[in-house]
Image (cartoon, rainbow, N blue to C red):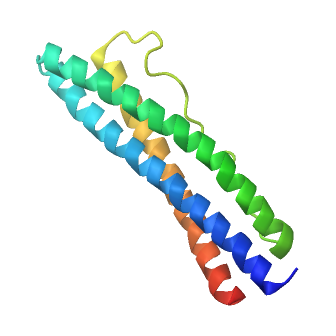
Amino acid sequence: MDRGQELREIREAIDAGNLTLQYLNRAREELNAASNFGIADMLGFDFIGGIGKHMKLSNAQKEMEAAKRQVMCFQKELRDVSTILNFQVDIGGFLTFADFFFDGILADVFVQSKINDAKKQVDNAVYHIHQIMTDLYRMEANAR
């Protein structure tokens, strides 16, 4: 395969990775807002806190689902890169968002704990994708 094709595949992977990071960052913002509303809910601002928390959780869940779909696209682009350049990476295990937001929520403290767990998962995913992106940018520079 020629260098032009290699560079094209690397750039497609970079674009897919950047889009994945956008979804993850939006999910993080929604989770942070949900956490803030959750604290308000626990402090007794039940109506505002509860409604805001559930609205932000719903938004976060949508962003996380979009991020999961985009991770699949990113994986495909990484496979294309690995096929042409023997680039090995495994991103399958670190993005395991669960659909727990509205399943049997019993207490505000439990919900807050789940929000924090989801934030940690998003942060972990962002960290790993940043590492992969660093490698892709290095490969792009070498392919020029």
Q: Is residue 77 visible?
A: yes
Identified at 79% across, 85% down, the residue is: 3
Q: Residue furthest left?
A: 44
63 lies above or below 39: below
12 lies above or below 114: below
91 lies above or below 134: above
Pick the quarter of the image with the N terminus.
bottom right
User: In this image, 74 relative to 108: left or right?
Assistant: right
Where does residue 133 sit, x and y in percent of width and height?
Answer: 58, 68
Where does residue 58 sit, x and y in percent of width and height?
Answer: 39, 26
- Residue 59 occupies quadrant: top left
User: In this image, 31 relative to 84: left or right?
Assistant: left
Pick the quarter of the image with the C terminus.
bottom right
2 lies above or below 26: below
Q: Nearer the viewer, residue 48 or 128?
A: 48
Q: How many marks?
A: 0
- Residue 108 occupies quadrant: top left
- Residue 112 occupies quadrant: top left
Where does residue 61 sit, x and y in percent of width and height?
Answer: 45, 31
Identified at 62% across, 48% down, the residue is: 71
Where does residue 35 sit, x and y in percent of width and height?
Answer: 27, 33
Q: Is residue 91 visible?
A: no
